[in-house]
Image (cartoon, helix red, strand yellow):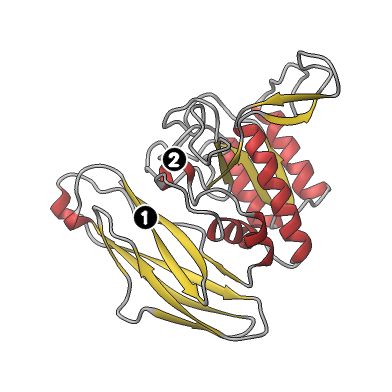
Amino acid sequence: MLSNAGSGSESQIIAGMEWAAEDVRAKVVSMSLGSQEASDGTDPMAQAVNTLSRDTGALFVIAAGNTGAPSIGSPGAADAALTIGAVDSADQVAYFSSQGPRLGDNALKPDLSAPGVDILAARSQYTAGSGPYTAMSGTSMATLHVAGVAALLAEEHPDWSGQRLKDALMSTAKVLDAEPYALGAGRVDVPAATTASVTATGSADLGFVRWPYGDDKPVTRTLTYTNSSDTAVRLTLSVDEARRRCRLPRRHRAHRPAHGTAHTTVTGDGTHAAVGRTGGRVTASVDGSRWRTPRSSW
C-alpha cells in the first residue's frame, strides 16, 4: 500500500484494505501504519475499517502510533480496529507508544499491547544496516506480534468473526500496571488467548462526563460472555473501584451453557464523578481462570 519510502495516500491504503478483506478474504489484516494527526474515528480510512470489518468479518490489527502522547491516528482510531500499543521487555509502556483517549469522544484506545522495543526481524533492503536481520522499535513491531496471535486463534476457531477474535485477545490479555488509556486491555497473552474456552466483551466505554457533572446520567453497557466448550460454566463477576462509581447488577454471577452465551450489564454513574480520566476492569472468574473487560470514562 505504501512506497519504498514508507508513504502513501489515503486512497491507496483504503484500496489495499479492500483488496485484503474482499479479494483475498483474509481473516486478519495487519497494518503497521497510520496518520500523524489524531483522528476521531470518522475519517475515510477509519470508516473503511469499520465498513470492511462489518461486511467481511475480517479483523484489522492496526498500530496505535509512535507519538508518545494522547494521539491515536487513523486508521487505528476506528471503532472496529484492534489498535495496538507497545511495551518493553519489562512489560512497561514504551516511551514512544501513542496513548488514548480518542480525539473528540474520549473513547478507549489503544485496545491491546505487545512487545515493541528492540524487536529482531528480517531486514528489508530499504532499511539501513547490513545482514539479513535488524532490530527495530515501534508500535508497528508490536502490531505484528498481535496479528500473529490473531492468526493462531483464527486457525483454532475458523468460524469466529473478527469481533470475536478481538474480544478473545483483549479479554485474555495479561493485566499490566497501566491504565486502559495507555495499553488497553494489557499485553497479549498467547497461551491464554489460544486455549481459552470462554471469551468476554473486549471493552466497555462508559462515556464522557461533561460539566456540570451532576447533570450527567448513568451509562449502562452490556457485557457478553461466550462459552465455546462442551461444559457449562458459572462465572463470578467483580468490578474494581475507580473514581467514577461503577456497578454490576446485584446478581454477580453469569451462567453460561455449553456453546452458549450469557449477558450482564455494567453501569457508570457520572453524577458521582471526579474530574479526570478513569479506568478499570470487570473480571469474570471460574476455577482460577479469569477474563477481563477494561472499562473507561473521562
Image point 14% across, 46% down: which residue? 212
**Distance (Cα) linking label 2 and label 1:** 12 Å
Question: Where residue 29 sits in the image (x, y, percent)?
Answer: 72, 45
Determine which of the numbered discs, if any, sits on residue 74 in the image.
none
**Few, some or many residues within 10 Å of mark 1 (<14, 14–19, 20+):** many
The residue tagged 1 is: 280
Which amino acid, by three-letter code, is at mark 1?
Gly
Sequence order check, earlier mark of 2 and 1: 2
Task: Check whether the beta carbons of the residues at disc 2 and disc 1 lie within 8 A of each other.
Answer: no
Q: Is residue 58 above or below residue 67?
A: below
Q: Disc count in the image?
A: 2
Secondary structure of the residue carrying numbered label 2: helix
Q: Is residue 294 left or right of residue 191?
A: left
Q: Is residue 134 left or right of residue 242?
A: right
The residue tagged 2 is: 182
**Few, some or many residues within 10 Å of mark 2 (<14, 14–19, 20+):** many
Question: Where residue 80 sits in the image (x, y, percent)?
Answer: 57, 50
Question: Where residue 126 sits in the image (x, y, percent)?
Answer: 80, 16
Q: Is residue 65 above or below residue 29?
A: above
Image point 84% across, 18% down: which residue? 125
Secondary structure of the residue carrying numbered label 1: strand
Q: Is residue 198 above or below residue 105?
A: below
Q: Is residue 1 above or below residue 250?
A: above
Question: Where residue 191 sits in the image (x, y, percent)?
Answer: 67, 59
Residue 157, quarter of the rendered image: bottom right
Which amino acid, by three-letter code, is at mark 2?
Ala
Q: Quadrant of the N terminus?
A: top right
